Image (spheres, rainbow, N blue to C red):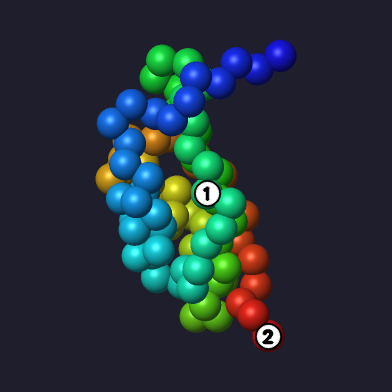
């Protein structure tokens, strides 16, 4: 089994959302989750809806880098989705 201890200490979800939304290429996001698995092991997962200006892998890589740099979370999974038709 997996034990999850809740939201990472010191993480303010609106700030995390602002970081992700501020990444070039992100049009919107949903299913944003952040949790602490154990001390020093925090995880973020998010689905980002692309705005059509950049490729998904490029946007995902930058979202990961920004979340690491601004929030200190190393384990970030980003699922890019195509822009609305």
Residue at 37% x, 45% y: name it: 13
Residue at 55% x, 71% y: name it: 50
Q: Is residue 19 left or right of residue 27?
A: left
Closest to the observer: 84 or 61? Answer: 84
Task: Please name the residue that numbered disc 2 is placed on.
Answer: 85
Q: Secondary structure at mark 2?
A: loop
Q: Specify whether residue 20 is in view.
A: yes
Q: Residues within 10 Å of mark 2 (few under 14, many from 20)?
A: few
Q: Is residue 19 left or right of residue 75?
A: left
Determine whether label 1 and label 2 are within 8 Å by CB: no
Q: Specify whether residue 58 is in view.
A: no
Residue at 43% x, 30% y: name it: 7
Residue at 52% x, 62% y: name it: 29
First reached walking from the N terminus: tag 1 or tag 2: 1
Closest to the observer: 7 or 51? Answer: 7
The N terminus: image quadrant: top right
Q: Residues within 10 Å of mark 1 (few under 14, many from 20)?
A: some
Q: Which mark is residue 9?
A: none
When the figure is inspected, residue 20 is found, relative to residue 33, above or below; the finding is below
Q: Which mark is residue 32?
A: 1
Q: Position of residue 68 (x, y in %)?
A: 36, 41
Q: Position of residue 51 (x, y in %)?
A: 52, 77
When the figure is inspected, residue 1 is found, relative to residue 48, above or below; the finding is above
Q: Secondary structure at mark 1?
A: strand
The residues tagged by marks 1 and 2 sit, at their Cα atoms, a distance apart of 22 Å
- Disc 1 or disc 2, which is closer to the eye? 1
Q: Position of residue 66 (x, y in %)?
A: 35, 51
The C terminus: image quadrant: bottom right
Q: Residue furthest bottom?
A: 85
């Amino acid at each position: 089994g997996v034990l999850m201890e809740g939201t990472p200490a010191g993480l303010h979800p609106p700030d995390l959302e602002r970081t992700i939304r501020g990444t070039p290429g992100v049009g919107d996001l949903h299913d944003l989750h952040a949790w602490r698995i154990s001390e020093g092991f925090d995880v973020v997962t998010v689905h980002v809806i692309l705005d059509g200006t950049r490729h998904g892998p490029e946007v995902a890589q930058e979202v990961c880098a920004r979340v690491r740099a601004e929030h200190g979370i190393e384990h970030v999974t980003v699922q890019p989705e195509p822009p609305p038709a």
